[in-house]
Amino acid sequence: MTQGRPRVVVTGIGAITPLGQGVDTFWENLVAGKPGIGPMTQCDPTNYPCRISGEVRDFDPTQYLPSREARRMARFSQLAVAAAMRAVEESALNMSAEDPFRVGVVLGNGNGGFPTLEENCRVLASRGGMRMSPFFFPMILPNMAAANVSRVAGAKGFNSTATTACAASNQAIGDALAAIRRGAADVILAGGAEAGISQLGLAGFAVMRALSTRNDDPERASRPFDAERDGFVPAEGAVVLVMEELQHAIDRNATILAEVSGFGSTSDAGHPVQPEESGTCAAEAMRLALEDARVELDQVDYINAHGTSTPLNDALETVAIKRLFGAVAYRIPISSTKSMIGHSLGASGALEAAACVKSITSGMLHPTINYETPDPDCDLDYVPNIARQVDVRTALSNAFGFGGQNACVVFRKFEE
């Protein structure tokens, strides 16, 4: 299938999510259709129309880092480091036995340390700039999640950060795939992290009217593809995959979970926030990913949708899927992880990558919960409300970001 080029596999997954810490807990709750959305606690949302979020509850960074070091990291970096440490442990990757210059880190992130940025701006306005934290820049910059994972793990090789908004994690996984294929690394810790829940972020999305206002019923607020959807629910989290060149994984007797077999990326080159109406550019990103994976349209067993629960996005993603797959689209099960955890922006693709890999290894599809009222503009199979047993050999994961940046990844069941 991939003769003539290096193959890249997943050997470990670390997950820090609104549905629990650890990929198995995350997956069990997804399959059970358990919502991870509740009242917002990361900031005071009193004066805003959205007061709910998908938060990582009971996260203690000192379980992963010395307290002094944890205090010098913004929350998105803390989440990334925790996810990376879990991924390395699950993969049984012995960093002391690896050439550190052959181990890289590529993470996606949208906002960097938004809450820390807001906090220091308040200090600037009230007490003066010289009272700001000397760690202000090392905390807020979007690249610091990858930098901190690199430092903690001792990974001195290829290092990069994708900041393509909601497409960032898929872009990071695609960049890692390309780097390993071209021989730049044997192993890359790839994925994404986001922890931007703050009044600054909340206000920005609220004035755009992009957020759900179902504050009295948070567990039912995120409802992708449902006719009564009214916006996305802000969320946070981190997932890191251990991606390896196949022979490297075999040589160290690693457990192979799935193969990362294709990536495609396009730009709408249009509206700054709204997806392109014809679905052409999103469809092309999917087509490119499948072409890279050498997969035919009728070989796709599952699509993990971007599925944000906004009126426009869900309808136009449906248009894009039908544009590419034609009649085949009606036979492919599709679900939205965001129905249970909300939209973690730059980290969302990584959380959904974990769901794709677990779908392949478990033979289960998690549902799209809160699907109650069919929308004639969204007329595909969204695996409504109840998990489904399916033999998943090929999974396609979609991520479409502000700026019209589209990134799609193909995961396949590993076969020698």
Image (cartoon, rainbow, N blue to C red):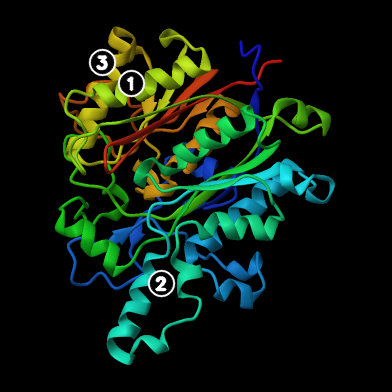
Q: Which residue is mark 2?
A: 116
Quarter of the picture holding the C terminus:
top right
Whichever of callouts 2 and 3 sits on the residue coming sooner in the sequence is 2
- Badge 3 marks a residue whose secondary structure is helix
Quarter of the picture holding the N terminus:
top right
| Residue at the image point whose x is 63% and y is 76% from the top | 67
Whichever of callouts 1 and 3 sits on the residue coming sooner in the sequence is 1
| Residue at the image point whose x is 52% and y is 65% from the top | 58
Type of amino acid at the residue the image marks with label 1: Glu
Type of amino acid at the residue the image marks with label 2: Thr
Is mark 2 in CB contact (under 8 Å) with mark 1? no
Q: CA distance from mark 2 to mark 1?
A: 37 Å
Type of amino acid at the residue the image marks with label 3: Arg
Residue 32 is situated, as x and y percent measured from the top left of the image, at 47, 39
Q: CA distance from mark 2 to mark 3?
A: 42 Å
Residue 390 is situated, as x and y percent measured from the top left of the image, at 50, 19
**Residue 251, quarter of the rendered image:** top right
Mark drawn on residue 323? 3
| Residue at the image point whose x is 76% and y is 26% from the top | 247
Query: Residue pushed farthest bottom?
Result: 127
Q: Please indicate whether residue 61 sits to the left or right of residue 11 in the image.
A: left
Q: Which residue is mark 1?
A: 284
